[in-house]
Image (cartoon, rainbow, N blue to C red):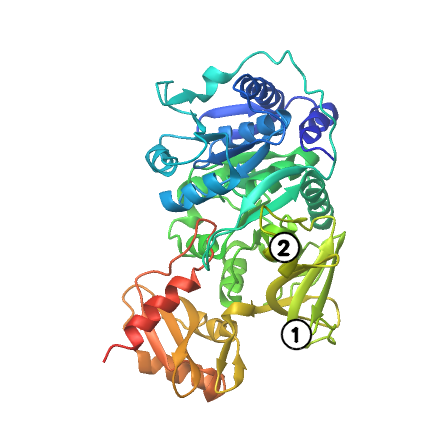
Amino acid sequence: MNLKNLLETNIAKFGEYPFLYYKEKKITNVEMKQYADQFASGLRKLGIAKGDKVMVCMPNCPEVLYSYQGITRAGATIVPVMFTLHPKELHYIARNSGAKAVITSSAVRNNVEQSLEGLPINPQLIVVDQPSDDLNKNFYDLLVPAINPMDEQWNPGDTAVILYTSGTTGNPKGVLLTHKNLYSNAENSAKHNETERGTTLGVLPLAHVYGLTISNICFLTGSTIVIFSNFQLEGVFKAIETYKVKTFSAVPAMIHAMVSYPRADQYNTTSLESVGSGSAPLPVALMRAFEQKFGAKVFEGYGLSEAAPVVTAHKKGIEIKPGSVGIPIPGVELRIVDENGEEVTAGVVGELIVRGDNVTPGYYQNTDETKRVLKGSWLFTGDLARIDDEGYVYIVDRKKDLIIRGGFNVYPRDVEEILNAHEQVFEAAVVGVPDERMGEEMVACVVKKQDSEVTEKELINYCQDHLAKNKTPRRIVFLEALPRNGVGKILKTYLRKQALEIVIKP
């Protein structure tokens, strides 16, 4: 179950084939192993030892995946970090993890250098696309012949990755993920989806748990990844046509962009069978629009960093239930529990808890948080959900996003579904703000479609036509865009601040 064995087994089973496409480059699985072995030797020459932490922070490029395999082969621990983070956030992660090295690129080097100032340990900076200088070493200059194979003993329970959460409600927490967590989750995800050998698109951030998951699944299935440094609509459609792509993973914002792209019909997308959607709730109206336009299914799923990450998903051969995130993947057990930890009956909303080989052993250097979310063998996710009689899971909301208005629970997603179905709404998110009379009041943050003249009153009346009055927003706040993190999650913490500032204005 060691992650490096995935690449070894891939080569033994499938022989040499193109594993990555990036711009004009084609990199085979054998070439990738050579880069990884040589980089591992280079890291060891720098003094990186078993258990040392190495940050990887850069936009999508092949070197992200070379780094993952190289770090693993050196016996070190991968710390994937979103390149969009602020230098202060990067500084916290570098300090908390005690990183001995940071691998980055010219696109974010300045931010990374700022983040490393004032650390008790001065990490070695490694840049993939700039020559070595007094401050950094070039990635390729570190490649040395792999003459000293690792002789340490490996344990499936060894930490392979520390994945820092987004930290929208405080400092990021370092989720410990073992080789067993990641290997079993990739294996069971591939089994659940009956993943066939083929070519997929790498449009989500690779310097995130997604990068580990997609590469591990491709190792297992003998598949290929077309890497994009950013989400380019024309490039995505061209790649689907060129490589006959059957499936790939995206977030709702990307799916929306594909539906809205005016030149989509200029490309042959008939090979596309499905798109996996995660990270944020998928509006039912958007799912139907995508299926109608491309004749491809949208398989919504659910996961979280602490579960390495996939928990549930739709798949081929089963009914797609709009609004549901599918059924548990093999090896994952779920329950819905009340505030006392007692299991509730089908259809009742409670907290979703998870257990299986994919569940984290805890947070890095954070015993209190570990005890809070891990009780016995169960991971308490903090997500409110219900399960129907057929085992389909419906995520109702984040526990912390629940709005209690006048003593009644109101779930923002119910209102978001209504607003997202409005013909003049591009997207919407609903938050609660403090209210002296009601405890909390509901505010909907709405991005209008281009040239829309819809008013606040019209949208409130529209909501009241579909929901009970006490479940509809008191105010509508119009924004140019909704704030998101690097993997497409709407940052409701920031929305609450924006909404509150607007609502309390006289």
Looking at the picture, how far across and down is residue 168, in whole percent? 45, 57
Front residue (pair 98, 27): 98
- Separation of disc 1 and disc 2 at Cα? 18 Å
Residue farthest toward the left in the current orientation of the protein:
506
Which quadrant: the C terminus?
bottom left
Give the amino acid at mark 2: Thr
Q: Which mark is residue 138?
A: none
Left or right: residue 116 versus residue 248 is left
Circle 1 crowding by C-alpha within 10 Å: few under 14, some 14–19, many from 20: few
- For residue 329, what is the image quadrant? bottom right
Point 49% across, 17% down: residue: 142
Task: Find numbered disc 1 in the image and state the secondary structure of the residue it sits on.
Answer: loop
- SS class of the residue under badge 2? helix
Identity, as a three-letter code, of the amino acid under mark 1 = Glu
Tell me the residue that label 2 is attached to.
Answer: 370
Mark closer to the chain start, 1 or 2: 1
Label for residue 339?
1
Residue 394 higher or lower than 189, as above or below: below
Residue 116, above or below 462 = above
The location of residue 395, given as percent across then percent down, is 60, 67
